Image (cartoon, coloured by chain):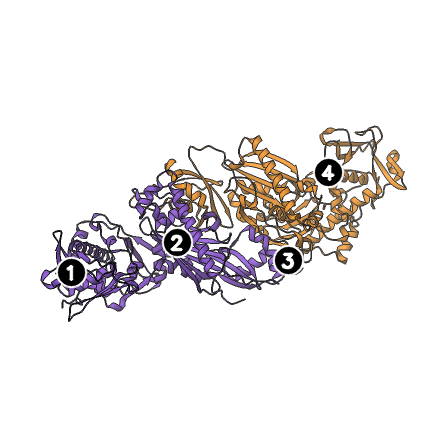
Chain colours: A purple, B orange
């Protein structure tokens, strides 16, 4: 009885009633749980109250209790007899604008028992947040968008459960992290005010709902925790990422950047958290966004130029013949071109240094990454000066955002003790290359920590570690969100960052031209 | 903004969002309410979250909020624009084994806007708790009993609302007080363990449910507060009665007795509460119960014997010709017979004193209350010696229970500063008569306070006075329930109480034979 519960499943032995102790069945069970959990209130649904007298007697006053907590409020979701070995599962959802990732977790052991990703079915309506918000304003738009994601989730949850050999009714807790707009559309909320001044969401802290209220087919009493947002441009996916990184509990000051459709940045430690998002107006036009090209088999993600032969050594996804280049490949390429002098500090291709790989086409400089006959379809692959210019604007925007937020809190980028890079695209970036072009600051490489899908990982953490659930609102409430004002100072920083690696070379001592 | 809310409806003016204060709509409203209510958490259903952005803007950031609270947990049930004058109602329910009483209250003003009573439709299954519990054990029994009361309630709520000119959807809060078994059957809970050792209910503190969860047709987000019980034999109707009496907040020690199907007693003050119920085994066989005869037009409820002529002056309900006698009439009759020597201190009819009203029939003494030709159907009305003996056992049981609980807490009956008499039957008892036969202790008459339907009144109080809602669990938790052990001491007290007014005459100094 003194054992502390480790997960959301807690075994209790209830003292059976006697003539001298005639507390009711439900109160008896809840009192035992309250003592164990050191709480005063435990919510319980009527449908479970109905089952308890039979269940607790069949199980000889000993049972596995499935619980969940949100903002200090515990809920008893289900109880299981000791001989009942049906799975008890949780589902973590990363609800992205483009991709949705599901992860199934055994709540009793914390082990992962399945994972599945699928394209957000709302892509049929529009590829990005903005088109979907505009569509939502049309008649039946919200309902259609809501149905698209719910139907998709229910279908894919069914598939995932099928592979794992469990029923969706075995899922008792679901955690969902997504950006503010995706979260609104999941809940069926009108997103119109997100993009209209003064840019406010319907809700910052959605909290906990029953799956049935939301229209998700899990256990009928399953609870769904929806991660809160800080505002229209700093969503639950980032709160989840911060939770996963541990930024909020660390004494050291760290920075987390999520490079996805936008660049969202948070810097801080256990005492304070400052955040901003890179959706910051015309200076970033075509900015960070453009780097996020889709990855897939045959896409070049690594570029190394041989220092002796100057040959291009290309790595592709799944080692398929090259058919394109993704963001991390492009950063590698730009870094290598710069180090070998094939582009100058302004990012301009240098015909003399590029040799046979240099061509002019339609009046514009190009570099041949894959010569004719060597690629997937025999076609050559070029990168134009325009592509490089665009990359340089992106990297300059990224560096400017990082520099701005850091200096706003009175720090220098070199003071950052840990630098977490989150997001699907972010995970593939090689910090060495990103430093070489001045996209990321010139920190010791070991300070860079890729987080992978930190949104999914944070949502998973809640399923396996009850003690972190209280941190979610704590993170949200402690974040100071700063609007990125594209003022003269910002533009000055941005202009200085549009060189390779930077106008101020002393900021990048490790970057040496060969 | 500093005005304290008086009822469950609170008007708030929300500061509209700006670029410098972009808290979301729902959080903005809830933060305003949290400040006002001095609370940290307010629960809100998804269906209301969906409506808030439109409602709050249409109403220019000012709204009437309908709230409810249970155990420190506030819930926002609905919001109304300032120009929305639809009624906002609450419903108090006294769920009796025999009768159900509904009262409709305007939540904004606290005024009563309708009342309606009907027979508990479960009477079709059985008249008392025990038959219904046995029936519940048959196949489909619980479901049938549950459907009977739900259908009855929904039908009668519809009728009540029709008369009041409102829709059941205008009802946002319902409070229900009933005995433990009735409460179980209302919730659809299996009552079998209530009558099986160790006699425990399914739940002591049912708490708050959505009307839809319970199957009551009100506003879909309406909350239903079900009064808690102390055990199988001390139900929510009594907790509600205690709340209404104010016993739990008074410095003086008071006693509350609810004389209905059983006699339930609670004694105490703001510091402690001790309770017992009169379902206490063979000594009370045919005990308190028998007195509770049904009242109705033409039923004798007052008996006075003229001290000069010795004529019986009979009062009947609605002044109709006499056709029977109810409990309070019988107590009057016995008191008058005793005072005028027509029965002796053992309760035996005295032929010499009764004169022409004395007859023997079927070998048993009788007294003619209504002579032939004077009653409703011309028939005479007799009371037999057996009826009087039964009444004396009842009054002895009542007095013994009162004496036992009072002495258990170290007091004498004369120490009781206020004596509340609750329940339909209890309200009609004349304390002077009840004292004369030794049913109630010989206290100054002004200490006796009839409470009427205190169960309904307590349930109503919660609808009109938010500050009392926290007292409900407080009362429940502070009650020490004592089992009435029918031991030798109890039997000795009972034997002593089987005389008129009592073996120990000094306990009843005010009772004088004429």
A128 or B323, which lies in front?
A128
Side of B282 where A210 appears, left or right: left
Q: In this view of the protein, can residue A70 be seen by the observer?
A: no
Task: Give residue A22's mark.
Answer: 3
Q: Position of residue A342 (x, y in %)?
A: 13, 62
Mark toward the viewer: 1 or 3: 1
Q: Are marks 3 and 2 in one subunit?
A: yes
Task: Give residue B294's mark.
Answer: 4
Task: Give residue A227's mark.
Answer: 2
Q: How much space separates mark 4 and mark 1, taking CA atoms?
A: 98 Å
Mark 2, other Cα within 10 Å: few <14 / some 14–19 / many ≥20: many
Tag 4 subunit = B
| Mark toward the start of the polypeptide (1 vs 3) | 3
The local secondary structure at tag 3 comes to loop
Q: Position of residue B481 (x, y in %)?
A: 65, 54
Q: How much space separates mark 1 and mark 2, taking CA atoms?
A: 39 Å
B4 or B408, which lies in front?
B4
Q: Position of residue B287 (x, y in %)?
A: 76, 47
């Amino acid at each position: 009885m003194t054992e502390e519960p480790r997960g959301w499943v807690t075994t209790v032995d209830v003292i059976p009633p006697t003539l001298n102790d005639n507390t009711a069945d439900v109160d008896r069970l809840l009192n035992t749980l309250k003592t164990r959990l050191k709480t005063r209130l435990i919510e319980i649904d009527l449908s479970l109250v109905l089952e308890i007298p039979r269940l607790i007697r069949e199980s000889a006053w000993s049972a596995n209790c499935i619980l969940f907590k949100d903002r200090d409020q515990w809920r008893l979701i289900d109880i299981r007899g000791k001989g009942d070995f049906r799975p008890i599962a949780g589902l973590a959802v990363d609800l992205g604008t483009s991709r949705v990732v599901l992860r199934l977790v055994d709540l009793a052991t914390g082990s992962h028992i399945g994972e599945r990703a699928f394209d957000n079915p709302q892509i049929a309506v529009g590829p990005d947040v903005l088109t979907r918000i505009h569509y939502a304003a049309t008649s039946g738009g919200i309902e259609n968008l809501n149905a698209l994601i719910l139907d998709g989730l229910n279908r894919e949850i069914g598939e995932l459960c099928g592979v794992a050999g469990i029923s969706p009714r075995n899922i008792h807790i679901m955690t969902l992290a997504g950006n503010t707009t995706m979260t609104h559309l999941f809940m069926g909320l009108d997103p119109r005010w997100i993009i209209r001044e003064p840019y406010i969401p319907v809700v910052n802290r959605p909290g906990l709902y029953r799956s049935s209220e939301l229209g998700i087919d899990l256990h009928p009493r399953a609870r769904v925790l929806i991660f809160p947002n800080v505002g229209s441009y700093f969503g639950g996916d980032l709160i989840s990422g911060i939770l996963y990184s541990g930024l909020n509990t660390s004494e050291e000051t760290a920075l987390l950047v999520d490079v996805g459709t936008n660049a969202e940045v948070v810097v801080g430690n256990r005492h304070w958290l400052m955040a901003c998002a890179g959706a910051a107006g015309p200076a970033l036009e075509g900015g960070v966004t453009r780097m996020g090209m889709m990855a897939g088999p045959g896409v070049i993600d690594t570029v190394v130029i041989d220092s002796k032969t100057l040959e291009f050594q290309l790595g592709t996804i799944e080692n398929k013949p090259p058919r394109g280049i993704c963001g991390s490949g492009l950063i590698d390429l730009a870094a290598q071109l710069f180090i070998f002098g094939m582009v100058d500090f302004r990012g301009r291709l240098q015909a003399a240094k590029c040799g046979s790989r240099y061509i002019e086409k339609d009046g514009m400089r190009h570099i041949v990454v894959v010569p004719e006959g060597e690629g997937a379809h025999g076609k050559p692959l070029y990168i134009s000066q325009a592509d490089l210019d665009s990359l340089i604007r992106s990297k300059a925007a990224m560096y400017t955002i990082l520099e701005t937020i850091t200096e706003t809190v009175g720090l220098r980028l070199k003071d950052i003790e840990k630098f977490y890079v989150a997001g699907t695209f972010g995970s593939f970036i090689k910090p060495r290359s990103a430093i070489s072009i001045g996209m990321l600051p010139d920190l010791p490489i070991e300070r860079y920590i890729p987080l992978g899908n930190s949104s999914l990982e944070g949502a998973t953490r809640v399923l396996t570690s009850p003690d972190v659930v209280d941190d979610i609102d704590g993170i949200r409430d402690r974040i100071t969100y700063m609007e990125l004002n594209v003022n003269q100072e910002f533009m000055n920083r941005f202009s200085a960052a549009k060189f390779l690696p930077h106008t101020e070379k002393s900021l990048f001592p490790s970057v040496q031209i060969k």
